[in-house]
Image: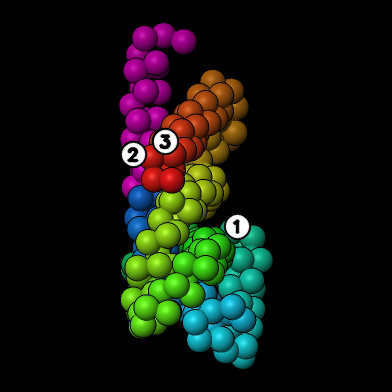
Amino acid sequence: MGILSTTSMASVLLNAFWQTLYMVFWSTLFSVLIGFIPAIVLTLTAPDGLRPCRPVYEALSFLVNVFRSFPFIILLVLVIPFTRLLIGKAIGTTASIVPLTISAIPFIARVFENALRETDHGVIEAAKSFGASDLQILFRVYIKESVPRLVNGVVLLIISLVGYSAMAGTVGGGGIGDIAIRFGYQQYRTDYLVVCSIILIVFVQLIQTAGNLMYKKMV
């Protein structure tokens, strides 16, 4: 491989890496903001929640499970009309954020619910005995006590979205996955496949390491 081709590969991969970061960042942000809402509802209406309501909990839990069951590659196709309506087009890096976010919302909602429900019930009962309102208990007990676990959940989400973003590349979403398919697979360039794989592995390892350090500082 000559210097020119090496430079060209570096340029292509760098641009693809930024596209991956772009997709992962925005889909993480949107899914966390939106997914936190059903997580709170599930936590409050659970049998051991502040406001137990079995019908609401079971219905919302069922919906979360249904959307979590969809394989991402199928979801990419199913949401094309919605993506086109929202973004104006169905392919491209920005358009890929829509299915990425939709697939991530039920995942992070369930992760956040589990994190919140792991809060020590002794602390919750103590807050009730001091006359704390449900809102105060939610923010000052549930969420405050769960911050390390919530952060850990976001790290898991980011890692999952890195993998999903690679799949988005198969349908014109851009990013590292797109390069691996177009150059590595379709043009039989093993070097591109190897480098793309290494980039994704290193990226995931860095995210996990950073997440572990943050978790240790919070607990």
Q: Nearer the viewer, residue 23 or 54?
A: 54
* CA gap, disc 3 and disc 1: 33 Å
CA neighbours of label 3 inside 10 A, class few (<14), some (14 to 19), many (20+) = few
State which tag comes first along the sequence, 3 or 2. Answer: 2
State which tag comes first along the sequence, 3 or 1. Answer: 1
Instruction: Check disc 1 and report its element: helix, strand or loop.
Output: helix
**Mark linked to residue 73:** 1
Q: Find the magenta span and give its range.
A: 1-22
Q: Is residue 16 visible?
A: no
Q: Please state which of the two labelled residues, at mark 3 or mark 1, is closer to the viewer.
A: 3
Q: Position of residue 53 (x, y in %)?
A: 57, 89
For image coordinates 44% across by 39% down, the residue present is 216
For image coordinates 51% across by 49% down, the residue present is 156
**Mark linked to residue 18:** 2
Would residue 87 be counted in the magenta stretch? no
Q: Is residue 124 visible?
A: yes
Q: Is residue 145 above or below residue 83?
A: above
Mark 2 is on which residue type?
A: Trp
Residue at mark 3: 213
Would residue 15 be counted in the magenta stretch? yes
CA neighbours of label 1 inside 10 A, class few (<14), some (14 to 19), many (20+) = some
Q: Position of residue 93 (x, y in %)?
A: 38, 52
Helix, strand or loop: magenta stretch: helix
Q: Could you say which quadrant of the image residue 88 lies in? A: bottom left
